[in-house]
Image: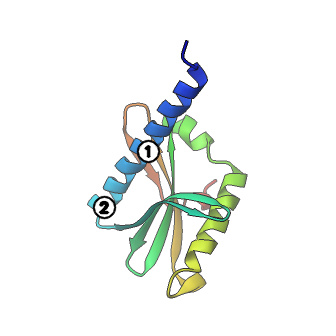
Amino acid sequence: MPNTRNHRGAMSFHAGLAAEGRIAQDYERRGFSVARQRWRGKSGEIDLIVRDGDGLIFIEVKQSRSFERAAQRVSASQMRRIYSCAEEFLGTQPRGSLTDVRFDVALVNGHGETQIIENAFGHC
């Protein structure tokens, strides 16, 4: 009998990858270039980093049955981790911490529809 929990975990992982791909395409369609997908630093991972001119947008992608459920999955501790990862990534950039940055949350619901919350961490 297959392990249901492992199967659900694998399905969730692949759904998350698909959601990240959908969001990357959305940003590219709007004229942004993808700098990194699933960038991993010492303090964790950032789902998507895109270039906005000389600036960067750090994007956390959340996928769930509804936009509301997806948004609820962004915790304060996760935001702190993303800030820390972003700081680490900025250390690799020519302008370092002087780089203009924004933190977005991209939500994907069970129908594959997307909703982008720009400057989301200021709203959470």
* In this rendering, position of residue 60 left or right of residue 74: left
- Give x and y (percent) for residue 6: 57, 27
* In this rendering, position of residue 1 left or right of residue 15: right
Q: Real-space Cα distance between discs 1 and 2?
A: 16 Å
Residue at (57, 19) in percent of width and height: 4
Residue at (59, 80) in percent of width and height: 91
Q: Which colour scheme is used?
A: rainbow
Task: Farthest residue to the top: give it.
Answer: 1
Vertical comparison of 18 with 25: above or below: above
The reply to whether residue 64 is in sight is no
Residue at (52, 25) in percent of width and height: 7
Secondary structure, mark 2, is helix
Judging by the rendered image, the residue that carries numbered circle 1 is: 17
Residue at (60, 82) in percent of width and height: 97
In this rendering, the count of numbered labels is 2
Task: Farthest residue to the right: give it.
Answer: 77
Q: Which of marks 1 and 2 is nearer the N terminus?
A: 1
Q: Report the disc number at residue 28.
A: 2
- Give x and y (percent) for residue 11: 48, 31
| Viewer-closest of 47 and 66 | 47
- Give x and y (percent) for residue 77: 72, 53
Task: Farthest residue to the front: give it.
Answer: 1
Q: Which quadrant does the N terminus fall into? A: top right
